[in-house]
Amino acid sequence: MEWKFHPEAEAEFIESAAHYEGEVPGLGNRFGRAVREALELLLVNPEIGSPLNDKLRSFIVASFPYSIIYAQQGHCLFVLAVAHGSRKPGYWKSRRFR
């Protein structure tokens, strides 16, 4: 199994890591590792995330106020958002699966 990011989710991830790195050197790398570790867990067991509806799930990133919003599509984990907990809920709902 592999993961793929929606282009906007990838941009969120990169921007968030850059923001953390700008605040504290090394924190952006820690955030990136935490997201990758969460994705690795989801690849092994995609059903551990909390169901949002019949297709989407959410999984909290350890040590950071972010959730990964994703769907399993065959042998692919499709990441729709890397969502900050204080951002407007559901802002990513208009994004389409690939």
Image: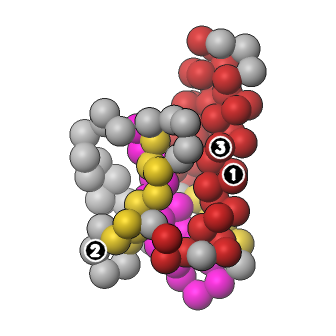
Q: Which residue is mark 2?
A: 53
* Three-letter code, disc 1: Arg
Q: Position of residue 92 (x, y in %)?
A: 34, 53
Q: Secondary structure at mark 2?
A: loop
Residue 80 seen in render: no
The disc label shown at residue 36, or none: 1
Mark 1 and mark 2: Cα distance apart in space: 24 Å
Residue 6 appears at what percent x and percent y?
Answer: 53, 58
Q: Residue furthest bottom?
A: 74
Asked if the residues shown at circle 3 and circle 1 are in contact, with their CB atoms under 8 angstroms apart, the answer is yes
Residue at x 69% of width, y 62% of height: 40
Regarding residue 23, the answer to whether it shows in the image is yes
Magenta highlight range: 68-84
Q: Residues within 10 Å of mark 3 (few under 14, many from 20)?
A: some
Quadrant assignment, res 33: top right
In the image, residue 40 above or below residue 36: below
Numbered disc in front, either 3 or 2: 3
Q: Secondary structure at mark 1?
A: helix
Q: Is residue 50 left or right of residue 13?
A: left
Foreground of the two, 4 or 50: 50
Q: Earlier in the sequence, mark 3 or mark 2?
A: 3
Q: CA distance from mark 3 to mark 2?
A: 25 Å
In the drawing, what numbered circle is on residue 34?
3
| Marks 3 and 2 close (CB-CB < 8 Å) | no
Residue 52, quarter of the rendered image:
bottom left
Q: Is residue 43 above or below residue 92?
A: below
